[in-house]
Image: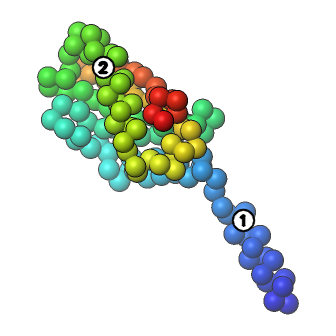
Amino acid sequence: MKKILLLIAATLLVACHENLEERAAREAAEYTRKNCPQLLNMNTRLDSTTFDIPTRTFTNYLTLMAEADNPEAVAANQTALHDALASELRLDTSQKKYKDAGFSYKYVARSDKGKGKVLFQTTITAEEYR
């Protein structure tokens, strides 16, 4: 009888166990629900974060405000912005389990004044942050 109960318990634990991609999606949704919108600095707000299981990509939706909400300046600094985000991600230890799995990170920055106009969009792959 003990063996049957242990087998049933083990089966239930395995059946309820989520994989890393499912965990990432759940954690992204929970983070958004609990913390967003979140002012990152005087010019940037994190509106939400999502995780797309098929592409294994986190997407951070940002709004650029005040001085940062400048389409010409953002366009002129696309490479520098991408490199800064890759560098920041490289140093971010809170994402270790996801970086070790090779997940990608996408950033979509919209204008506050332009009512959602995308000013900047980039994806950082595992090769770039390792």
Seen at 37% across and 44% down, the residue is 92
Is label 2 or label 1 in front? 2
Q: Name which residue lies at 18% across and 31% down.
A: 43
> Which sits in the foreground, 81 or 8?
81
| Disc 2 to disc 1: CB gap under 8 Å | no
- Name the residue: 36% across, 42% down: 91
Label 2 – label 1 distance at C-alpha:
45 Å
Horizontal side, residue 85 vs residue 96: left or right: left
Amino acid type at mark 2: Ala
- Of residues 29 and 75, the one nearer the viewer is 75
- The residue labelled by disc 2 is 80
The numbered disc on residue 63 is: none
Residue 75 place in picture, x, y as percent? 29, 11
Across and down, in percent, residue 15 comes to 72, 63
Tell me the residue that label 1 is attached to: 14
Q: In the shown orientation, is residue 43 left or right of residue 79? A: left
At horizontal 63% and vertical 56% (from top left) the residue drawn is 18
* Residue 66: image location, x then y, percent: 14, 25
Specify the farthest residue to the bottom. Answer: 1
